[in-house]
């Protein structure tokens, strides 16, 4: 809608001020849950949506062998073809490995961590350069396969330009867990889960800067200058930067604030996790179509006005954890674990 204020001035010229808001989006999703795993603890860490008939998830799924005995060799990929989920093993140099992140540019160009690429129908083993050795890649993000970023523990950041990897010195030893950005700027968030610290870095014009830090502080100290707690996930949406972990923050109009539309989203709010759990993932189509997910079966959708729990009801005692969630138009896929089983929830609006 438009709000128009007119002021008649002495020269009989009226000035109009127009404020435009976005339409709301629907909360109406149908959903299915799938569980995988027959022994040990199975979990899925990340997911990529190509389209409704082509979805990939990565992690560790432990199944029994043909004789019904626990098979120690896990599956590290599960793929949806529109009808069924197929468990797969992607080997690197003949061995199985835990894949923690996946990033898809299209159906013919998909990256599994930083050294396995599915390209034009073939899995290609890439050489692991020294820059990527000695640390596990937690997340991938990029604008193309010649502009790809990887982050991991102990502050590791690397960039791939289409032919080689380059190390980016982060200036932190915190574990980096999330990436988001656009062609002009990239953001990296990270945590120390033992000390409940967080960090947010910005990379622009080949320069990295620390733009936010989190730690345990009193309610009156927030935004002056620290934020509270860990920064597990970051998401750049249009002109708004969202940052999630203990709370959901936004950076807009050059200032930090809580996302006030989310109930009890402030220090000393949400007592005993009664409203939602720790936030592991933020995904969005735009500013009025956002999903946050995390522990205790947290799966909340923002439609431009309010937030609604999707799928099964929220339960502060739930053993379901949504570790990565992606939205693509009217399709949402979230992955993680439910107890000791890997879990996928597929939602359609």
Image (tube, rainbow, N blue to C red):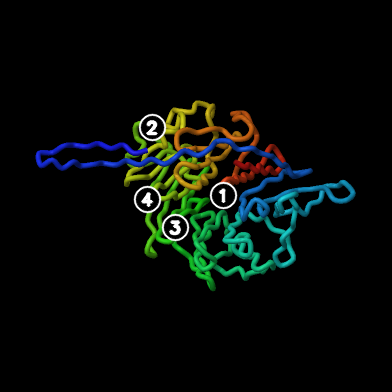
> Which residue is disc 2 drawn over?
218
> Which residue is disc 4 drawn over?
211
Q: Residue at x 60, y 34 (%)?
A: 296
Q: Residues at badges 4 and 2 in contact (C-beta under 8 Å)? A: no
Which of disc 1 and disc 3 is earlier in sequence?
3
**Label 4 secondary element:** strand
> Which residue is disc 1 drawn over?
328
Q: Residues at badges 3 and 1 in contact (C-beta under 8 Å)? A: no
Measured in 3D between alpha carbons, the distance from the residue under mark 3 to the one under mark 1, in whole angstroms, is 17 Å
Residue 49: where, in percent of width, then height?
61, 53
Measured in 3D between alpha carbons, the distance from the residue under mark 2 to the one under mark 3, in whole angstroms, is 34 Å
Q: Residue furthest right?
A: 67
Nearer to me, 106 or 278: 106
Residue 120: where, in percent of width, then height?
66, 68
**Label 3 secondary element:** loop
Q: Quadrant of residue 338?
A: top right
Which of disc 1 and disc 2 is earlier in sequence?
2
Task: Name the mark nearer the viewer: 1 or 4.
Answer: 1
């Amino acid at each position: 809608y438009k709000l128009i204020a007119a002021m008649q001035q002495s020269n009989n010229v009226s000035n109009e001020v127009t404020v435009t808001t976005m339409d709301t989006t629907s909360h109406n999703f149908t959903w299915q849950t799938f569980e995988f795993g027959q022994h040990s603890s199975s979990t899925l860490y990340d997911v990529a949506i190509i389209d409704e008939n082509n979805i990939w998830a990565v992690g560790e799924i432990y199944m029994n062998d043909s004789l019904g005995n626990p098979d120690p060799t896990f599956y590290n990929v599960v793929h949806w073809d529109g009808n069924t989920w197929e468990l797969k093993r992607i080997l690197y140099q003949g061995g199985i490995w835990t894949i923690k992140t996946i990033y898809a540019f299209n159906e013919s160009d998909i990256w599994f961590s930083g050294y396995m690429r599915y390209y034009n129908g073939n899995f290609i083993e890439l050489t692991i350069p020294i820059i990527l050795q000695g640390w596990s890649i937690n997340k991938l993000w990029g604008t193309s396969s010649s502009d790809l970023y990887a982050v991991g523990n102990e502050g590791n950041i690397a960039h791939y330009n289409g032919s080689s990897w380059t190390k980016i010195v982060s200036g932190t030893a915190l574990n980096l867990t999330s990436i988001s950005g656009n062609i002009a700027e990239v953001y990296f968030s990270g945590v120390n889960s033992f000390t409940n610290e967080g960090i947010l870095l910005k990379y622009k014009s080949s320069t990295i800067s620390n733009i936010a830090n989190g730690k345990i502080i009193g309610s009156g100290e927030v935004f002056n200058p620290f934020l509270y707690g860990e920064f597990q996930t970051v998401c750049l949406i249009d002109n708004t930067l969202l940052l999630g972990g203990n709370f959901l923050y936004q950076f807009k109009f050059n200032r930090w604030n809580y996302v006030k539309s989310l109930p009890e989203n402030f220090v000393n709010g949400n007592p005993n996790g009664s409203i939602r759990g720790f936030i592991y993932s933020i995904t969005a189509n735009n500013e009025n179509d956002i999903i946050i997910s995390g522990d205790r079966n947290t799966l909340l959708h923002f439609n431009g006005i309010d937030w609604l729990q999707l799928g099964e009801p929220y339960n502060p005692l739930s053993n379901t954890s949504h570790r990565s969630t992606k939205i693509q138009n009217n399709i949402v896929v979230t992955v993680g674990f439910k107890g000791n089983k890997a879990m996928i929830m597929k939602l359609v609006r």
